[in-house]
């Protein structure tokens, strides 16, 4: 099994972490031109904050 580490915005993480009952989030690429093909459904996706925090803050499983 493989996984993927996606670097995410500190403010976006702070916002999402304040929302009750979230069980799904979107991870998007700024250009949006290329289809993400890094994972198959059900493989782990880790969320890491940008520098200077630079650590894993969440996890999920890729859906599509």
Image: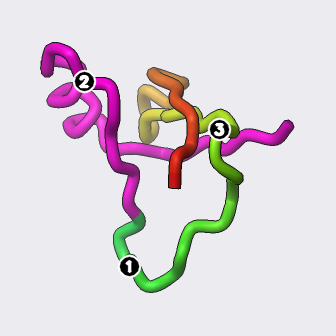
Rendered location of residue 23, percent (x, y) = 32, 25
Which residue has dot 3 on it? Answer: 42
Rendered location of residue 28, percent (x, y) = 38, 60
Rendered location of residue 40, percent (x, y) = 70, 52
| Residue lying at 15% horizontally and 14% vertically, measured from the top left | 20
Pointer 2: residues within 10 angstroms few (<14), some, or many (20+)?
few
Q: Mark 1, mark 2: which one is toward the viewer?
A: 2
Helix, strand or loop for disc 2: loop
How many discs mark residues in the rendered view? Answer: 3
Which residue has dot 2 on it? Answer: 22
Which residue has dot 1 on it? Answer: 31
Rendered location of residue 30, percent (x, y) = 35, 70
Helix, strand or loop for disc 3: loop
Pointer 1: residues within 10 angstroms few (<14), some, or many (20+)?
few
Q: Is 18 inside the magenta-drawn segment?
A: yes
Going from N to C along the chain, the mark reached first, 1 or 2, is 2
Pointer 3: residues within 10 angstroms few (<14), some, or many (20+)?
few
As drawn, 39 above or below 34: above
Say which quadrant the N terminus sits in.
Answer: top right
Helix, strand or loop for disc 1: loop
Going from N to C along the chain, the mark reached first, 3 or 2, is 2
The one nearer the camera, 9 or 26, is: 26
Distance from disc 1 to disc 2, alpha carbons, whole Å, reads: 25 Å
Distance from disc 1 to disc 3, alpha carbons, whole Å, reads: 25 Å
User: Residue 41 — which label?
Assistant: none
The span shown in magenta is: 1-28
Q: Is residue 64 left or right of residue 38?
A: left
| Residue lying at 20% horizontally and 16% vertically, measured from the top left | 21
């Amino acid at each position: 099994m493989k996984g993927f580490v996606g670097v995410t915005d500190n403010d976006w993480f702070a916002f999402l972490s304040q929302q009750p009952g979230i069980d799904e989030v979107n991870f998007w690429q700024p250009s949006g031109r290329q289809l993400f093909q890094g994972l198959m459904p059900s493989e782990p996706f880790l969320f890491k904050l940008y520098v200077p925090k630079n650590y894993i803050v969440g996890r999920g499983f890729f859906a599509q």
